[in-house]
Amino acid sequence: MMKTNHKPISKFLSLILRHNPAKIGLQLDDNGWADVTELLSKSKNHSPNLDIDLLKEIVQNNDKKRFAFNDDQSKIRANQGHSVNINLGYIPKQPPEFLYHGTVAKFIDAIKEKGILKMSRHHVHLSQDRETALKVGSRRGKPIVLTLRSGAMHTNGVEFFQSDNGVWLTDHVLPEYIEFK
Ligand code: HQG
């Protein structure tokens, strides 16, 4: 049997649950949760095929575990990547000695000057391994992977968090912690 292409619906859910719930008249609570029944009914015009079974399949099989249900599956939220202001309740966590950031050549001069900024997201997103950072960078062209001295940052008082799907988050990475070779 051919596997359904979930990508358009996953993109639609990312847009609604991370950036623009008002597009379908939905409200997220302070912690980013949307009511599942409401999400489904309000999505009808935009995504007619979306029903509870498909939603469950997407939550379970999404390549990056972008979404999560609460315990009784009455609510859903995005695990990270929001631009709307919500509190995901992350607890600070000690990062590994090194983390990685995938980017492209055209940003390197600005990063040398200002460090890695969160741009339109709530946090700078960092990867646990080079392979993941390569994929992140490839979204924008020929990838460059920067190695970050996250252990030293943490020792010097910078907070890190880890999202439910394993992405490391921090507020800002100063140039002095980045290896540019
Ligand atoms: C760059 C995807 C100029 C930064 C991915 C990046 C990830 C600067 C871009 C997640 C800069 C921001 C996050 C500075 C940083 N000057 N450019 N000072 N500092 N940049 O998309 O890390 O599919 O907001 O290098 O897989 O690329 O959404 O961040 O190129 O996990 O689930 O500014 O998004 O996951 O881009 O990606 P983004 P990102 P999802």
Image (tube, rainbow, N blue to C red):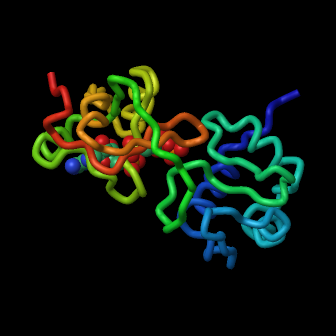
Rendered view: 51 above or below 53: below
Q: Nearer the viewer, residue 26 or 123?
A: 123
Point 44% across, 20% down: residue: 131
- Residue 133 placement (x, y as % from top left): 40, 29
Which quarter shows the N terminus? top right
Q: Nearer the viewer, residue 22 or 165?
A: 165
Q: Nearer the viewer, residue 96 or 100?
A: 96
- Please tell me in which quarter of the rendered image ligand 1 is found: top left
Point 81% across, 56% down: residue: 50
Q: Residue 15's image quarter? A: bottom right
Total labels drawn: 0
- Residue 84 placement (x, y as % from top left): 50, 67
Side of 130 where 52 appears, left or right: right
Side of 166 where 144 appears, left or right: left
Side of 45 where 26 appears, left or right: left
- Residue 44 placement (x, y as % from top left): 81, 68
Rendered view: 160 above or below 15: above
Which quarter shows the C terminus? top left
Point 19% across, 33% down: residue: 177
- Residue 41 placement (x, y as % from top left): 83, 70
Side of 164 where 174 appears, left or right: left
Rendered view: 60 above or below 34: above
Point 79% across, 38% down: residue: 4
